[in-house]
Amino acid sequence: MPYAMVRVTLFYVTGIGVAIQWPGIFGIELVIGGTLGYLIFRNGAIGLITVLLFGYVRTEIHTSKSVNQISVNCYKAVVIRYAEEKASTWKLEATKDQTKVLLYLSKKDFPQPYSYGDVLLIKGSPQLIKPPSNPGEFDLQRNLHFKNIHHQHYLRSGQVKLIGHEDGNPFIAAAIKVRLWADKQLKTYVKGDREQATASALVLV
C-alpha cells in the first residue's frame, strides 16, 4: 500500500502533539484495546487510531508530571552527552540517580570540559529550571520538559571533582568522538567565532 508509513508517521506525530496540548485524557488501556481490536478485525482505521494513541501514551510516560526541588549537599553525576561550548560556559548533560541535570561550567575555571562517561562529584544542589519571566519569551522550561530535563546547576572552581569514568553506550561514545573530530576540522578551516558556530549548527546537528 503506497505511502503507508507516511500515514503511520503522521498519526504517531499527531498523537505526540495531542499529548503536548491536552495531557491526561487517554490511558494505556486504550492502546491495549486498540491493538487487540486491530489484531481481531484487521481494520486499517483501528490500526491508525491505535498508532495515534501509542504516540500520545508514550509522550505521557516519558514526560514527568511533577518535579521537586533536589536538596542535597553534594551529589554524584555521570556525563551523558558531549559538551556544548557557549560564550562563557560549557554546557553538559548529566544524570543523577536517573534524573537529568544540565551543568554549566565557567570557562574561566574549566578551560576544558568533562567528557562523556565521566563521573563527577558535585558540591551543592541543582536548581529547578524557571519559567520565562516575560510574555512571549522563549520557554526554555517547557522545551526541556519534553526531554525530561528539569534541573540545572551553574558550577565554579572547587565545586566539581572527577572521581571516575564509565564506558557507557559504545555507539554513543563513538558518535561523540566523530562529532568532536568533525568540530575540530570545522574550527581549523572556518575562521571567525560566528562563522564557526553557524557551520557547526548546520553540519553537526
Image: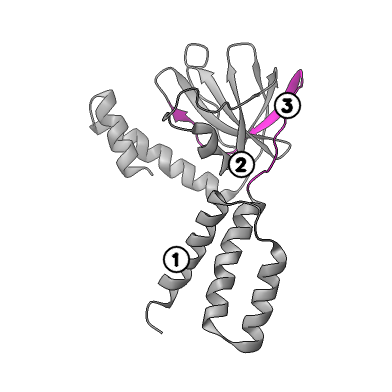
Whether residue 187 is visible here, answered yes or no, is no
The amino acid on which the numbered mark 2 sits, given as a three-letter code, is Asn
What is the magenta segment's predominant secondary structure?
loop
**Can you tell which of label 3 and label 1 is closer to the viewer?**
1
Tell me which label, 3 or 1, sits earlier in the chain.
Answer: 1
Is residue 9 positioned above or below 117 on the image? below
**Can you tell which of label 1 and label 2 is closer to the viewer?**
1
* Residue to which mark 2 is pinned: 148
Element class at badge 3: loop
Q: Residue at x 35, y 33 (%)?
A: 184
Q: Residue at x 42, y 24 (%)?
A: 86
> How busy is the neighbourhood of tag 1: few (under 14 within 10 Å), some, or many (20 plus)?
some
Is residue 17 positioned above or below 134 on the image? below
The amino acid on which the numbered mark 1 sits, given as a three-letter code, is Leu
Whether residue 189 is visible here, answered yes or no, is yes
Q: Position of residue 123 (x, y in %)?
A: 70, 17
30 or 69: nearer the viewer:
30
* Residue to which mark 3 is pinned: 70
State how the image is colored: one colour
Residue at mark 3 to residue at mark 1: CA–CA distance: 38 Å
Q: Quadrant of the N terminus?
A: bottom left
Q: Quadrant of the C terminus?
A: top left
Q: Position of residue 73 (x, y in %)?
A: 76, 17
Q: Which mark is residue 10?
A: 1
- Corner quadrant of residue 42: bottom right
Residue at mark 1 to residue at mark 2: CA–CA distance: 24 Å
Q: Which residues are magenta?
A: 63-85
